[in-house]
Each structure stands twice: as C-alpha cells, then as structure tokens.
Image (cartoon, rainbow, N blue to C red):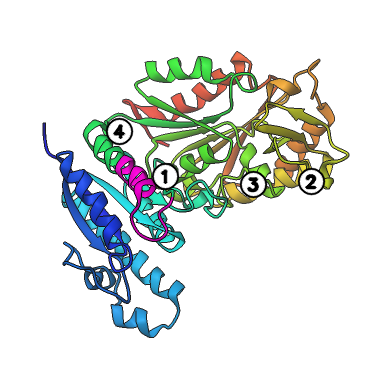
Amino acid sequence: MTIKTILVIGTFDTKDDELSFLSGVIQQQGGHVVTMDVSVLGNPSKPTNYSKHDVAEEGGSSIQKAIDSGDENHAMQIMAKGASLLTARLFAQGEFDGMIVLGGTMGTDLALDVASALPLGVPKYIVSTVAFSPLIPSERLAADAQMILWAGGLYGLNSICKASLSQAAGAVLGAARAVQRPDPDKPLIGMTSLGTSALKYVIPLIPALEARGFEVAVFHATGMGGRAFECLAAQGAFACVFDFCTQELGNHVNGSSLSAGADRLTGAGRNGTPQIVAPGCYDLVDVVGWQPLAEKWDSHMVHEHNRLLTSIVLQAEEIKAVARAHSEQLKTAKGPVTLLLPEHGLGEWDREGADLHNPDGLAAFLNELETTLPPNVQTHRFACHINDGAFADKALEVIDGWCADGTIRT
C-alpha cells in the first residue's frame, strides 16, 4: 500500500502539544506528516516543515507586518491567505494526500479558507472547538469538508482531547487511503432537487442523461447541498447544470437560516457553465422545524415536513420578490441560460388537488419573472407540471440541442 502524507496545519506556538500528538498518531498508523505553522507571535518547540515566515511570504506579506498591524483578526487573515496559497501549491506539486487543521475560532476561520483552496476529492479535515456551530456560515464550507468537534481541547492535552484528536488522525489518514477522486474525463451534470415526495424529475432524468454519456450528481437543496453545488459550479466542475430546485434563493431572500448563501444561482454563471434552470418549490421557505416560528409567518400556511424541517408557504408579494431575485442572479451569467417554466406547478404539493395548490400565486410568480428577466435568459413556458414526463423531455431537448459529438457546445 502506498504511504500517504498528511499536511498538518495549526498554530504551533500555542498548540504544539496537541499538533504533535495528532501528527504522532498519524505516523503510528503508517502515514507521513508534513507540518505547517500558522502562528504569529510565538515559535514551535521544534522547526516545522513550513514555517510561519513561509506562510506569510506566500501571501505577499510578512510576520512583522502581521505583528505591526496590532490586530489579531488582520494578522490571522494574513496567515489565512498565505496558508491557502501555500497549501494549494503544495498539493499541485504532489506534496501531500490529505489535510487537517486544528484550532479554536481563530484556527477554524483560517481552516475554512484553506479547505476551500483544495479541489473536491482531497481529504480536508477541520478539528475545531466550534464545529457544527452557527458561527460557521454555509458559504465558507468547501463542498466536501469534514468537521470534527474538538471536545475538551481548549488548553492542553487530556484524555478527552486525545480521544478527539486520535479519531481525527485516523479519519484523515483513512480518507487519504480510501478516497476515490472524481473522474475528470467524464462530463458531469450538477442537478439540484429535494426528496421525491416533492420533486420527482430525477427519476427519468438520471438514466436518460447517463445513457447520453453523462454522470449526474444530485444536490439536496436544503442549504448545505446548494452551498456545495454553488462551490463546485463556480470551480467549473460541471459540463452543465440542471438547477431545478432554486428554493434556497427564496430561503435567503426571506431570512431563513437554511440558506446556501447570497450567491445562490450564480456559481455556474460566473464560470460560464451552461445552465438549464427551473424554479422548483419557489413558493416555499424552509425553516428549522424544532424552533418556534417567527411572528412574520403567523398568517401563512405551514407544512411540517418532519421534526427537523418546516416549510412556509409564501404569499403574493413575497412570491414576486423571489421571482425578482431569480432575475437578478441570472443576469450575471456569462454562459447560456435556459429557464423552464411549467404552468401546472413547481412542486408535488402544489399540484391541482394537493394541499398547497396555489394557481394564483404561480401565475403571479411566472408573470413577475417574465417581466423582469434579463435578455440573456431564454425561457420556455409550457403546460405541464415539473414532475410530469413532459418537463423532463423538455430539459433533455435543450441539452440535446447543445450537444455535438458528446460535447456540450452552445
């Protein structure tokens, strides 16, 4: 078995014992370790492979400038920039197979940037005292970042701390040994959706696209899934996107914490990736189901999906605001955009006869879209439901028109 090398990053001036323990466990398990110090003020007990000076200089700065700033936040941002650039360069040179960063809030802030500098399929672990906390915004998470809560790890080693760190060491080394990285030679389509109780187009589309030679990755559009989707779309990971559940944009517009970030519906466009878009579940805003509903939702219909998630049904003016948000995001696209607008509903719960059927709301949404859409968006408005076979057929018709010799050419 090929020996795997793990890049271990942290502030070796204050967390030398913990980082050394983590490195030791990786080595005991048969891995190699490369160390990177992102300290500012102090020094490690023994030299690291990449010093704090190497890190600062990689980002076009220096440790002295970080110190002279007199601001710990500014200083750590200097180190975050340098660590991100140095990590990306070292990986491109084949220096390591997986990465792990250790820290509190300062180290976690840096770790989020470093993880985002690495491509999908490179194991990237963040051991943090604030893992899974609302302090961490979804838009800063790399698509496949792994987080481990660092229990009992604020000051020094102890048995609880060692339990967390030893598991983290095994996780990153095991991931480096087991990972199967994406095949860059197979064209990949990124698709957004919800479960098939709400959106069913994935059922006919996936085999049809696979028969055309594509691989399909479906992202669960409940905040974190959309974040991963946007991250990869912006990196150019997709040959084309089938963005058929844009509900997260409505979540963001209406202040839900289940947001994929302010840049939802822009990643593919920034990269010039061809987009086929449909505003699936445009009329719903998802909120955390186990928290009390905000007063502003008192007059709204509510759908309790499960104990984790509750959906709020938007009203007329709110629906129009979501439509305008779609237009604003899509106008920035550098590549082709085709917008599919089924007139009989955009989610299973708003079919005729279903509990949330709202034909007036749908008509208001579609009309607002058509009056605000920028000229770079081609629209197809047709008489079907998003879960009907006719919708999937139209999406396939669009991509077939873009394809030549197995390649998308628009």
Please say if the residues under marks 4 and 1 sit with CB atoms less than 8 Å apart: no
As drawn, is 204 to the left or to the right of 87? right
Q: Name the secondary structure under disc 1.
A: strand
User: For the point 20% across and 49% down, which residue is it?
Assistant: 24
Q: Nearer the viewer, residue 318 or 37?
A: 37
- Range shown magenta: 152-168
Q: Tell me if residue 49 comes above or below residue 274 in the rendering.
A: below
Q: Which mark is residue 370?
A: none
**Residue, disc 3:** 257
Q: Is the residue marked by circle 1 packed among few (<14), some (14-19), or many (20+) residues within 10 Å?
A: some
Please say if the residues under marks 2 and 1 sit with CB atoms less than 8 Å apart: no
User: For the point 47% across and 34% down, which residue is it?
Assistant: 241
Gap in angstroms between the C-alphas marked 1 and 3: 19 Å
Give x and y (percent) for residue 358.
82, 27
Gap in angstroms between the C-alphas marked 4 and 1: 21 Å
Q: Nearer the viewer, residue 189 or 178?
A: 178
Q: Earlier in the sequence, mark 2 or mark 3?
A: 3
Q: Quarter of the image for the N terminus: give it.
A: top left
Q: Which mark is residue 294?
A: 2
Please say if the residues under marks 4 and 2 sit with CB atoms less than 8 Å apart: no
Q: Earlier in the sequence, mark 2 or mark 1?
A: 1
